[in-house]
Amino acid sequence: MKKLTHLIPAAAILLSLSLLAGPLLPGHDRGMYDLDTLARLPVSAGGRTKPLDTVARNSLLIISDRQTATIDGERRSAIRWLIDVMARPNEAGAYQVFRIDHPDVKSLLGNPPANQKRFSFDRIFTHRDTLEQQAALVQTIKKNQRTPFQKRLGELFNHINLYIQLRDWHEPYAVPPLKPGEQWRPLIQEIHGPHDGQVGEQDTAHAPPGPAAASLGNILLAYQNQDPDRFNREVRQYASMLDQRMPDTTRKARFEVFFNRLAPFYQGTVLYVLAFLLICGSLLAVNARSDSLAKGLGRAAVWVIALTFCLHTFGLAARVYMQGYAPVTNLYSSAVFIGWFCVAMGLFLEWLFKNGLGAALAALIGFITLIIAHNLADGDTMQMMQAVLDSNFWLSTHVIAVTIGYAATFLAGFIGISYILMGVYTRALTPDRQKALGKMMYGVIAFALLFSFVGTVLGGIWADQSWGRFWGWDPKENGAVLIVLMNALILHARWGGMVKTRGVAVLAVFGNIITAWSWFGTNMLGVGLHSYGFMDSAVQWMLVFVAIQLAIMSAGLIPVSRWRSFAP
Amino acid sequence: MNKQIKKILAPVASLRLTVVLFALAMVLILVGTVAQKDMGNWAVVNEYFRSLWLWMPIGLGGVRVPFVGGYTIGGLMIVNLLAAHAVRFKLTWKRAGIILTHAGLILLILGEVLTGLFAVEWQIQLDEGKSANFAVDIREVELAVVDPSPADHDNVVVVPQSMLEDRAPGLPISDPQLPFEVQVLRWMPNSAVTGLGMAEPSLRENNPATDGLGKMVIAVPQPRASGVEAGRVDFPAAYIRLSRAGRDLGTWLVTQNLERLGSETRQPVRVGDKTYLIELRFRRDYKPYTITLIDFKHDKFVGTETPKNFSSEIRLVDPTVNEDRTVLIYMNHPLRHRPLNSRGETFYQSGYVGETTTILQVVRNPSWLMPYIACSLVALGLIVHFGAMLWKFVGRTRR
């Protein structure tokens, strides 16, 4: 039986590693074309140099809300879809990629079945007259005044537009700067001249396409003519030419394709769930008085979390390398970072207290934040920073400190939730555990206060450096200062003896609401410099989250004599 | 300390008061943030944070209750803190962290108060090749009455915004320096103008203007702009009746919108045989120095509209300190300059219009250094205090 304590962790690690290795194995829809080399070709989109693979995946993510495309019931990779769109536009029109959820928008496409979610470009094209009429109506209304129907319709038009840009070679900027002074440019411009569409005097004077554009044209032509030998020759020749001319760029592009395949944050989500299940299993084993099983499962959970944490860390580091910015640049990366830091703190608490709670919270928060990140990803999550925010010094000090403050406040809130739920509904909150949880909360809140304060003031100093105003009472700044005040309030209330551990727990749960408000709510207000990502659906989730926190707080306010853990 | 004093100070020094103040501050900031959705950002700052008290809206229905403002809360926090240290705290090594933190906090609050009281912000908008010897305050306008008759200069009399907006209808503004009396018929803190032909008939029929621009366009009130940095500012407008010695000189529309529309901003008013020019413009502050924009550069990321960087190469000429130099101002790299007998001013690259016009933010803030010192003190204090705590705790658990 002793062996279980070693066997289970080993098995769990092996299982995790095999999960990770899966997507790195060669894909199944390779066919005769060397799409792997094609996927690694660097291009420029949204101001960032990235592999064609990323453009394909992100475009699909925007249009279709997933990274694969379906044609005739068959699933195909993103790069296959993109080369079809670019080189065989007539056939590619049959891909069912345009995701439409709103029933009224759907009905514009001739009343399709209610369960169909994705539509082909061909189908949309046959209803173009209806859509164009609607487009003319929607365009007269300001973005923030549109009804949900109009918003969804506006999104669909953007998606169609993106598709056409790809099909007609306006996007991405595929032709690389090979001579000094050159910049990335669209393939169409190089082949048809800068005045495409304007047939006239400019056309004849236009110089022939450069070598890179000619190669790209040949690659697309070979694919169009269904000539795999020529396609493979051309694409490999072009790739090795780029390897010589811009080695740094191609190295980065190759790495990014590896990153896309590994999908560390997606895999991390799965592994955090696995770890959480292992912990639940270990709790059940404790109840069943099977000690070695409980110990084995608990240890396996910690090992899986540690492994996933390494993966999570690798993902963050990889983004820093690819993007060239400090890890937090937008809402998406803040979710990834908050999760990462909570997991780190959870593991640290586990190391200190060894009671399973740190590990459980690490797995849970890791999972939740990565899910949030996954839902925040809309297209490229590594956008370039606009001038005022383009400063790695401040991105790596102010932003990191504030985000750590968010993470720590959330962690304290989740410990508070554990305290209340364990105490009210189970008998698990023993005096020992009460003491341990109280210490955990206190330490984490103190830590949160330090970082949220320093981060907030550093933000003020950045603002003073940038436009001479230390404090502008911007909504996001106010949100940050609310977190500082919340943490300070909890600590002073405890020092003054106004609350004991239970009160700290209830207040810490309220800290979750404050943090969520600061993180997302201020963006929902849509005012101020910091309002970088407004989302409608998030508002509902936010309300749900707040309601849950309030419910837990009121459970925490039930007199202690009625808590199961304190009942005789 | 004297026991009697301690007894009096005790309630002021209580941690209970501290917690209550934190809670009040949170409510104030939360409601203030939500209010920014509908009110101008500066209006919120002045009403909520830089005030002693205010009427705070509670939920829907427009019901308002009195609430403490930022100055009251900040002031009470300082009193509470000082009293607490006087009553309870001793100067020991164990307390060093807390004392450092609290000293820093006092500095921070004082710094914000001083900034609120003494900091001034202006803007300079410049085209390439043009010079300016004044900066404008985009939060305030003034009515300028210009007498262009002297050959080598203009004589300018200005009526500040405070006189325009507070004036009760019917009570004219008169001054020996003004060539006419000004009666404000209607004042709009923010406005938009539309062509008279496109306006609704009811507006057109009730158009108060009888002369000048107001016969072609009509000004419609707008909600005040919100957001600090989004580049949105208020464009005030007013309908004013001018008269001299009881003789009506017409009702005029004056508005800040004109500068934005790029049309002639000054309207001629004939008084007897003399012509004056009137204009509603951002309040000007004339400087002892001159700034010339040599070159404005502005790059975007390839294939996007995202600005990558922008910078202004300017020439600064200040005879008071005998300076004549060329400087490059760009993001996160401001220019600090101090004219003779004046406080230092800092120039920031704040925005741009088109490809060749820069917008510089000019700030005079005598207390700009305080937050830096305050932040260092607080951070150091917290690290000392919590660090010692953690060290002790980890040591005990690990043993």
Image: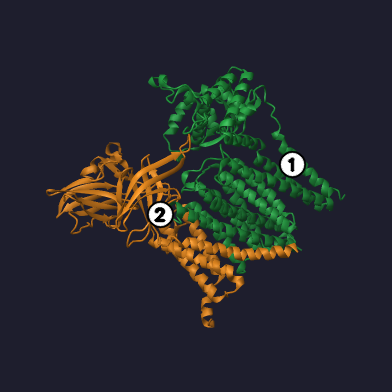
Say which colour chain B has.
Answer: orange
Which chain is drawn using green?
Answer: A
Mark 1 secondary-structure assignment: helix
Q: Where is residue A4 shown, x and y percent of the image? A: 84, 48
Residue B200 vs A508, above or below: the answer is above
- Judge whether B336 appears above or below B98 on screen: above
Subunit bearing disc 2: B
Residue B182 position in % (x across, y down): 22, 54
Horizontally, residue B136 falls left or right of residue A485, namely: left
Residue A184 pos. (x, y %): 50, 32
Provide residue A368's location: percent of width, then percent of height: 65, 46
Question: Which image quadrant: the C terminus of chain B?
Answer: bottom right
- Disc 2 marks a residue whose amino acid type is Trp
Residue for badge 2: B42
Q: Nearer the viewer, residue A253 or A105?
A: A253
Is any atom of residue B169 visible in this view? no
Give the number of the disc on residue A16. 1
Residue B88: in sight, yes or no? yes
The residue sitting at the left extreme is: B273
* Callout 2 secondary element: helix
